[in-house]
Amino acid sequence: MGTVNADNAAAQLEELIGGWRNYLNKRQAIHTVDVAELEDHLREQIAALSKAGLAPDEAFLVAVKRIGNLDTLSREFAREHADRLWKQLVLSSSDSAAERSALRTDAAVAVGLAIAAAAAIKAPALFGLTLDMDGGFYARNVALFVFPLLAGYFVWKRKLGPRLWLWPAAAFLAVAVFANVYPFEIGGSTEILSVLHAPIALWLAVGIAYAGTRWNQVAGRMDFIRFSGELFIYYVLIALGGGVLTAFMLMMFTAAGVNVESFFENWLLPCGAMGAVIVAAWLVEAKQGVIENMAPVLARIFTPLFAAVLIVFLGTLLVTGKGIDIQREVLIAFDMLLAVVLGLLLYSVSARDSNAPANIYDVLQVVLLVAALAADAVALWAIAARISEFGFTPNRVAALGLNVLLLAHLAWSAVLYISFLRGKGPFARLEKQQTDYLPVYALWAAIVVIVFPPAFGFI
Amino acid sequence: MDINKDLIAASSTPMVLAILAEEDSYGYAILKRVQEASGGRMAWTDGMLYPVLHRLERLGYVKARWGTAENGRKRKYYKITAQGKTQLAEERSQWQAVDATLRGIWQGLVAVLPDPRAIATMLMPPVQLLQRA
């Protein structure tokens, strides 16, 4: 009987310590190694107190109290290791040697692929295609220089079999063929549309490689959405840094009387822009969890602001009684508005705990959705009235098609969101709808790339 | 008697360095040694020792390594470095200077202020009486 009790007490103590450890591990400033050090201390203290006659759970409480207030302690650790929160961005704090060597291989592969991407954009120059003279060729193929390498990185990293990478590979090949064999009129609408839509279609191919075996799961696609957002943010940050570097470079060499502008235009900018995609992807991969929350944070900040702007806009329309002045570009402007609203929705959804109850932020999200839909409906109504007058040019059909897709997506999201707010459906349904809808955009982009040029006579 | 926080913070570096100069040690044992040496008057919050140790490590005064304790658990041991010993000597002379200065001034105050130890001795008998009652 005595030993059973002792065993129980020991198990209970382990559970208490485990809970304490988990709680401590959540603090960014205190690393796993430090938690291990503190845990050793805690256990020593508990042993000493138990020896003095305290029951294990009492000893645990006293020992935890003596360690001190964890907030203060975290603050002390953060002060002592102020670099930590940033250092994590490039260097991982992994403990085991195997893990560290895996990270090093990963970094080496990423750098190698980044160099390959930089080389890829310069390869056509060997065949006499220059950026200045053959801008169209480079624009049509821009995604093809780097996305296959990026997909390759994930294929390598996730050890995907041919069954999984054949699809992305086929997509890359198809776009490469269609982008280059069509006899586009130089600078024509269908060429520009193809340039704009090919990356969208191919991004899905990257997504299939990214999610790998999880592509058919909501979580896999959601991770890809998160990855895309973080990649974009990292890319912008790297681009800003590159801009500063370039500015200094130009300034210094100009002062020395050497003209480096052509080096900058022909080498640094294109190679840097390509390589940075891979480097940014590697950073996002290597440091999941550090600033993973950046895109959702931005979404959180801008959701109320966009909602406010849209409501004021609708109110203005109502008060002044004026319709929307239909210019040729208005449809594209509204497409972009819906795309931004979709981004806000996606990143809010991606960061939301699907089990949490509805809160004020969810209401705001719905307000944003409904306001955006109303604004877009007003615009569509105005355009529909005059669409025959403008005629069906490829640009307008593409813009209208995208608008319809976005409108359908957001309207269905709004319906699901409202039913969630009214307690009639789980949040997971909304998540599933977001991820299910992703391929639709890629499909539409593929149609624009493949069907539009011949349908409109390559104008 | 509680020693105030600023004094504890200021004295933590020489104290930890001095303990590590005695022999290599680890967090819990260092705290035990502080308690023992101060007769329990230095009340450190246990956790706070670790940021101090990490700072000393960053400054190069101590070196840390992971080892295994007698009970088989992983434990982080600290060892003073040559630089740490130099720093300890430096801190020590500073503290001695502070101590000497205070002593000099307090000797002049003896006539004005009662010696705290004398008050304690005077109070002891009534306190003991109360406790017994």
Image (tube, rainbow, N blue to C red):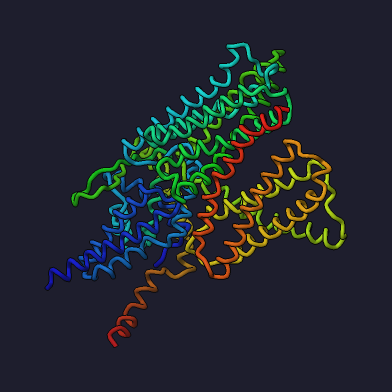
Question: Would residue B44 be seen by someone viewing this image from the given angle?
Answer: no
Percent x, y of residue B133: 29, 88
Q: Nearer the viewer, residue B64 or B82?
A: B64
Percent x, y of residue A208: 47, 39
**Residue A164 location, quadrant:** top left
Quarter placement of the C terminus of chain A: top right
**Residue A24 location, quadrant:** bottom left
- Which residue reaches farthest bottom? B133
Q: Nearer the viewer, residue B125 or A376?
A: A376
Percent x, y of residue A313: 79, 57
Quarter placement of the N terminus of chain A: bottom left
Where is A182 relative to A17, above or below? Answer: above
Where is A79 relative to B132, above or below? Answer: above
Q: Nearer the viewer, residue A298 or A224?
A: A224
| Left or right of residue A40: residue A391 | right
Where is A273 relative to A356, above or below? Answer: above
- At x 40%, y 52%, the residue is B12
- At x 58%, y 40%, the residue is A232
Question: Would residue A5 be seen by someone viewing this image from the given angle?
Answer: yes
| Left or right of residue A249: residue A276 | left
Q: Nearer the viewer, residue A388 or B100?
A: A388
Percent x, y of residue A113: 48, 26
Tally of numbered tags: 0
